[in-house]
Image: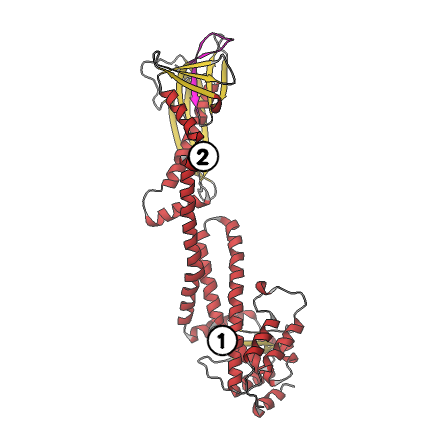
Amino acid sequence: MIITTTSTVEGKPVQEYMGIINAQSIVGANIFKDIFAGLRDVFGGRSKTYEKVLEQAKEDALRELSQKAQSMGANGILGVDLDFETVGNGGSMLMVIATGTAVRL
Amino acid sequence: MKSYFGSYYSPSTEPVAATVLVFDRNLSIGYRYPNGRNAMIDWPLKEVEAKYNAPTQQTQLRNTKKPGELLVIEGSEAATYIQAIHAERQKPWYQRSNGREGIRNSLLLLALMGGFVLLYILIVPWLSENMAGRVAAKTEQQLGDAVYNAMNLQAQEDTAASRVLNQFFKQMAIPSAYDIRISVIKEGVVNAFALPGGRIVVYSALLHKINTYPELAALLSHEFTHVNNKHSTKSIFRKLGSKVFIGLLFGRFGSVASVLIHHADELKSLKYSRSLEKEADMEGLALLTKRNIDPAGFTGLFTHLKEAVPKGAMPAFLASHPDIDKRIAYIKAASTTAKVETDSSLLSIFNQLK
């Protein structure tokens, strides 16, 4: 599976466009992570706890995207776009939306 | 997750080009039949055997439950990746990378919580009491008056009885920085309480139960100690300190945590309240013995309170005051050597009440 943000793949022409697919992952950092991150906010510096949560959400979204593409018989996803948002009460949860075009290369 | 291109061999079909997605627990194979139909197969990773064939430079993946099926991927990377996942899974949980991280985080969290608890149990109350000690008597008086006015008790005040009680207290000649003002309120509650800054409220039901002047002296000296030792002000500051601390720590995390913590806080403040009551009893007793007033006034007073409290009420650890039997016991133990004389002036003032 080739997952790329570009609209073409070098040396591999698109044989078939199979449509737009998207996948989202909404994760909540737990209360303890919030406490750690809150301390980071006070003392300054990078919050690895939140970074890890974000990374995990991105991984989950891309995994779901590639599963969707695979189930359609695609072997590549072009023009992938990742959107990051906060949802929930007071923006307490993170949402990652991955969008792309499933293709057969 | 990793993805690869490979060829899928099965007994029923011709070899087909396949996309392979390798996840933490499974591996999914997607391919297309020559007739254009899509197919997907899922292999649990624990059933997958990965081998790198050096001469052909290919990775061969076999499913132990499905003999005859074979997945061939160019290069060694897929084999290395899957073998690494297998190796990680064979370790006990505490040696895996996320297990270790979990242990480290829990320890860190425990230390942090311990620090917070220490701060909450020792430092916050200490700091709040210290601050309460610095509050000027005048400020306390304003605070007490504000509370008294807010309670709207003036209309029910028995001014004649109040006058007698104030006179009685003056006669006891207890030195204090506070201007003690006693109010008798007509109500059926067997109780009395002290507000910050010198206001003492006695309900008429309790006053009616009091038979002797040492009992009245015991009641007033107990409430006076509450005022003089700033008990109400300290309680208010402690509560305030706790609330601010909890608010800073848990304010953002909704109501669930705050309900739990609020109740723990309540129990803690009850314990504190009991310790203050004992202090008021003991120092009140000291005031009585200094003036040769009969300490039996306390035991008499407690007996009246006990009669007013329904049987099977709160156990001691849930109550704001110590158990009455315990109070009687420690007062008796502390007053064995007291010298008793009848004070005729106090007696004559007391008799005005009857």
Please, what secondary structure does the residue beneath circle 2 have? loop
The structure residue drawn at horizontal position 37% and vertical position 23%, both measured from the top left corner, is B80
Q: Which residue lies most toward the bottom here? A: B344
Q: Where is mark 1, residue-wise?
A: B227
Q: Quadrant of the C terminus of chain B?
A: bottom right
Numbered tag placed on residue A104 in the rendering: none
In the image, residue B128 lies in the stretch drawn in magenta? no
Task: Say what amino acid the circle numbered 2 marks.
Answer: Pro
Please, what secondary structure does the residue beneath circle 1 have? helix
Q: Position of residue A19 (x, y in %)?
A: 44, 19
Q: Where is mark 2, residue-wise?
A: B92
Q: Position of residue B241 (x, y in %)?
A: 44, 61
Q: Would you place residue B136 above or below residue A19 in this image?
A: below
Residue B151, by quadrant, is: bottom right
> Which subunit holds the residue at mark 1?
B
Q: Is residue B20 left or right of residue B190?
A: left
Depth check, front residue: B325 or B200? B325
Task: Say what amino acid the circle numbered 1 marks.
Answer: Val
The first of marks 1 and 2 along the sequence is 2
In the image, residue B21 lies in the stretch drawn in magenta? yes
The structure residue drawn at horizontal position 63% and vertical position 77%, both measured from the top left corner, is B206
Alpha carbon separation for disc pair 1 and 2 = 63 Å
Q: Position of residue B337 (x, y in %)?
A: 54, 84
Q: Would you place residue B256 above or below residue B76 in this image?
A: below
Q: Would you place residue B199 above or below residue B12 in this image?
A: below
Q: Is residue B35 visible?
A: yes
Q: Quadrant of the N terminus of chain B?
A: top left
Residue B86, by quadrant, is: top left
What span is in magenta?
B7-22
